[in-house]
């Protein structure tokens, strides 16, 4: 009976240590999104370059596309920007920007200085569309298939490794699917 009294707390402590060990091995950038495999939330947003024009999610059905969430005040967005430009220049897929909680003039200046890789940039001034997509920081990137289903989400700045090992193979697979 005395042995059980000491073994039970020891076993609980061991279990807590095991969970801690497993948790420390996880990559915090790989936060699973509940939206993967589900239709991308609908939106209708003005374009950054012409606020009289809007783009809806349904306008993008029928093609595989990327949604890159960014802001001019975001330092990691600047870090990933050359990769976004490369993706657009190689015409891997259409890249749409979602300018998140930003000032229009600052965003337009940022693109003028660093280059504009986007097929179009959508303005999410109040962040509501970002909330619908589960964005909790910028940058974030989504790959959306022809049916409008989110197939991939990357949190944080894109890296060459992520583009080559995850995005390129997925885009090829989705584009090859009939």
Image (cartoon, rainbow, N blue to C red):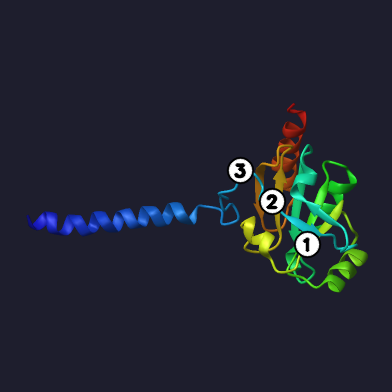
Tell me where residue 15 appears, x and y as whole percent: 31, 53
Tell me the quarter of the picture where residue 8 sits.
Answer: bottom left
Judge left or right: residue 144 versus residue 1. Answer: right
Tell me the residue that label 2 is attached to.
42
Tell me where residue 10 appears, x and y as whole percent: 23, 57
Q: Helix, strand, or loop for circle 1?
A: helix
Q: Relative to 81, say whether 34 is above or below.
A: above
Tell me the residue that label 3 is attached to.
38
Tell me the quarter of the picture where residue 20 sits.
Answer: bottom left
Judge left or right: residue 22 versus residue 66. Answer: left
Judge left or right: residue 60 versus residue 16. Answer: right
Q: Report if residue 83 is visible in the image.
A: no
Tell me the CA gap for discs 2 and 3: 12 Å
Residue plotted at (80% across, 64% down): 78
Tell me where residue 89 appears, x and y as whole percent: 90, 47
Tell me where residue 138 appears, x and y as whole percent: 69, 63
Mark 2 or 3, closer to the camera: 2
Label 3 crowd (10 A; few <14 / some 14-19 / many >=20)? few
Mark 1 or 3, closer to the camera: 3
- Front one among 168 and 15: 168
């Amino acid at each position: 009976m005395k042995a059980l009294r000491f073994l039970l707390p020891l076993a609980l402590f061991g279990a807590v240590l095991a969970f801690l060990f497993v948790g420390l091995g996880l990559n915090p950038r790989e936060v699973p999104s509940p939206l993967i495999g589900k239709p991308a939330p609908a939106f209708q947003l003005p374009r950054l370059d012409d606020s009289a024009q809007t783009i809806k999610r349904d306008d993008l059905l029928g093609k595989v596309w990327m949604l890159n969430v960014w802001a001019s005040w975001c330092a990691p967005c600047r870090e990933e920007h050359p990769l976004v430009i490369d993706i657009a220049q190689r015409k891997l897929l259409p890249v749409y920007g979602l300018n998140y909680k930003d000032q229009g003039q600052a965003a337009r200046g940022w693109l003028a200085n660093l280059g504009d890789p986007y097929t179009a940039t959508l303005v999410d001034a109040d962040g509501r569309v970002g909330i619908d997509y589960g964005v909790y920081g910028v940058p974030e990137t989504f790959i959306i298939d022809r049916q409008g289903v989110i197939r991939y989400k990357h949190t944080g700045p894109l890296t060459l490794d992520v583009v080559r090992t995850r995005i390129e193979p997925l885009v090829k697979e989705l584009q090859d699917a009939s």
